[in-house]
Image (cartoon, grey):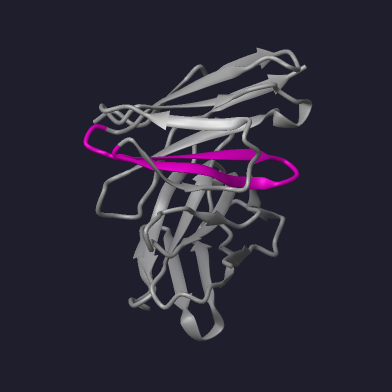
């Protein structure tokens, strides 16, 4: 069975601070895909990034960066110089893609950026 | 390019009734998945359809059903509604060849 753990339920930071959201996953599959989604109050899950299990390169996109480490089964997400618009619930998710793209989600981390 | 469209956005139903939710995927996407989101259980997978066939099903009772049409649009139905079915129901669409799922804004169902 697959499992995603986001140990941080809620985080509050002051604007312009950096913040890291943790994600730890469990899977027996050798091929899998990891995702981060952002859920603003409107409810829609906004796709942020996908990472394949065979590609451990870290990625940076503007103020966002992701650190994927297979050795520790972690896929952490860092927001640099946080802004109020970053306030949302962030979900980490996992799928094996083997015959189905069913996503297993973590419980989410609610990020509040205080001006 | 239009995103995933879910209708209606909000619904209030009475216990025992049934409800149908609709999802129009992104043009060209052939896979549609449904998820239920509640404060207690988080995001849980309901089912996945590809080319009108159910490819996978989550651990939900038979009261929850779905289908996909030839134009990839999908509907899910919940019969004999219970108070615990109150949730945000999210639909996601994917290309046939890739695992990225793009979500709609969801239908918020309230059962009273």
Image: B93 above or below A83: above
Tell me: residue A90, above or below residue A57: above
| Residue lying furthest front | B62
Please give the name of the residue rendered at 71% of the width and 46% of the height, measured from the top-left corner.
Answer: B41
Q: Horizontally, is A71 left or right of B101 in the view? A: right
Q: Nearest the camera: A56 or B66?
A: B66
Q: Residue B16 is drawn in which quadrant?
A: top right
- Residue at the image position 59 percent from the left and 18 percent from the top: B19
Residue numbers of the magenta segment: B27-51
Percent position of residue A86, x then y:
53, 46
Q: Position of residue A33 (x, y in %)?
A: 41, 65
In percent of width and height, residue A61 lies at 35, 60
**In what quadrant of the picture does the C terminus of chain B appear?**
top right
Relative side of A111 to A96, left or right: right
As drawn, B78 above or below A44:
above
Magenta segment's dominant SS is strand
Whether residue A43 is visible to the viewer of this picture, yes or no, is no
- Measured as percent of width and height from the top left, residue A60 is found at 36, 65
């Amino acid at each position: 069975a697959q499992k995603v753990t986001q140990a941080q339920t809620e985080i509050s930071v002051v604007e312009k601070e950096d913040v890291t959201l943790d994600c730890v996953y469990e899977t027996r599959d050798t091929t899998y895909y990891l995702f981060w989604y952002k859920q603003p109050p409107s409810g829609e899950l906004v796709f942020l990034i996908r990472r394949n299990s065979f590609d451990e390169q870290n990625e940076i996109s503007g103020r966002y960066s992701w650190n994927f480490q297979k050795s520790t089964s972690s896929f952490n997400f860092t927001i640099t110089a946080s802004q109020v618009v970053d306030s949302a619930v962030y979900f980490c998710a996992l799928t094996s893609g083997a015959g189905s793209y069913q996503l297993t989600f973590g419980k989410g981390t609610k990020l509040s950026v205080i001006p | 390019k239009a995103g995933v469209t879910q209708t209606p956005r909000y619904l209030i139903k009475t216990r025992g009734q049934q409800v149908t939710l609709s999802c129009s995927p992104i043009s060209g996407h052939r896979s549609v998945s449904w998820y239920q989101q509640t404060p207690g259980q988080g995001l849980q997978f309901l089912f996945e359809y590809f080319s009108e066939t159910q490819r996978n099903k989550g651990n939900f009772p038979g009261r929850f059903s779905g289908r996909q049409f030839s134009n990839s649009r999908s509907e899910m139905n919940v019969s004999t509604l219970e108070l615990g079915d109150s949730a945000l129901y999210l639909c996601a669409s994917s290309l046939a060849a890739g695992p990225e799922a793009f979500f709609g804004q969801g239908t918020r169902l309230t059962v009273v």
